C-alpha cells in the first residue's frame, strides 16, 4: 500500500509556472507507475500525464503536451508535475495516482489503485 500527498498548488496568473509534488509513503515508489489527473468544478476528472516506474515512458493529454512535464525521483519517493505556460483552463484540483502495475501507462482513472487528496491550482486571466 502507498499513501500519496500532493503539494505545490496555488494561485498564479496566466503564463506562469508551477511545480506540483506528490510524496509517497509506504511501499517503495519504484513499484508503481504514477499519474496526474485533474478535476475542474462541475467537470469530470481528466487525465493529465503518466509515467512508468523507471520514468522511461510517459504519456500526456493533448491539452498539456509541450507545456507540462511529469518526472519522478524514486529515491525521494516523489513525483513531480512541472506546469509551464499555464492557462485559465488549467484551473482544477490536481490529483496524484499510483498503479500497482509498474508498467501501467494509462489515461483511465480505474487503472490506478491509490489516490492523493488533491491540490488546488487556480490560473487567473
Image: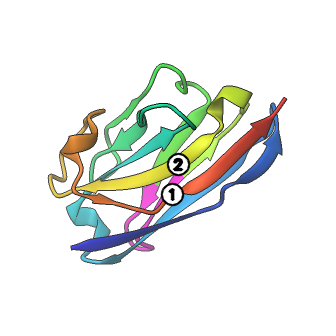
Residue at the image point whose x is 66% and y is 55% from the top: 9
Residue 92 placement, left or right of 58: right
Residue drawn at 28 percent across, 47 percent down: 52
Residue 104: x, y in percent?
Answer: 20, 43
**Mark 1 surroundings: few (<14), some (14-19) or many (≥20) residues within 10 A:** many
Residue 94: image tag: 2
Q: Quadrant of the N terminus?
A: bottom left
Q: Which residues are magenta?
A: 72-80
Pick the residue in front: 39 or 17: 39
The reply to whether dot 1 and dot 2 touch (C-beta < 8 Å) is: yes
Give the labeled residue for mark 1: 118
Q: What residue do we see at 44% from left, 26% from top?
A: 61
The x, y position of residue 31, in whole percent, is 21, 64
Q: Is residue 113 left or right of residue 75?
A: left
Mark 2 crowd level (few <14, some 14–19, many ≥20, 10 Å Cα): many
Query: What x and y, as percent, mark residue 21?
Result: 55, 61
Who comes first in sequence, dot 1 or dot 2? 2
Real-space CA distance between mark 1 and mark 2, rounded to the nearest whole angstrom: 5 Å
- The answer to if 76 sits in the magenta stretch is yes
Q: Residue furthest left?
A: 101
Quadrant into which the C terminus falls:
top right
Amino acid at each position: 500500500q502507498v499513501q500519496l500527498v500532493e503539494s505545490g498548488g496555488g494561485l498564479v496568473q496566466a503564463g506562469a509556472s508551477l511545480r506540483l509534488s506528490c510524496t509517497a509513503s509506504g511501499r517503495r515508489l519504484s513499484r508503481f507507475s504514477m499519474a496526474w489527473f485533474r478535476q475542474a468544478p462541475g467537470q469530470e476528472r481528466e487525465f493529465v500525464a503518466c509515467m512508468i516506474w523507471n520514468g522511461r515512458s510517459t504519456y500526456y493529454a493533448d491539452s498539456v503536451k509541450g507545456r507540462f512535464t511529469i518526472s519522478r525521483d524514486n529515491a525521494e519517493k516523489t513525483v513531480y508535475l512541472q506546469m509551464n505556460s499555464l492557462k485559465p483552463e488549467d484551473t482544477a484540483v490536481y490529483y496524484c495516482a499510483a498503479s500497482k502495475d509498474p508498467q501501467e501507462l494509462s489515461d483511465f482513472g480505474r487503472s490506478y489503485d491509490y489516490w492523493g487528496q488533491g491540490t488546488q491550482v487556480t490560473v487567473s486571466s
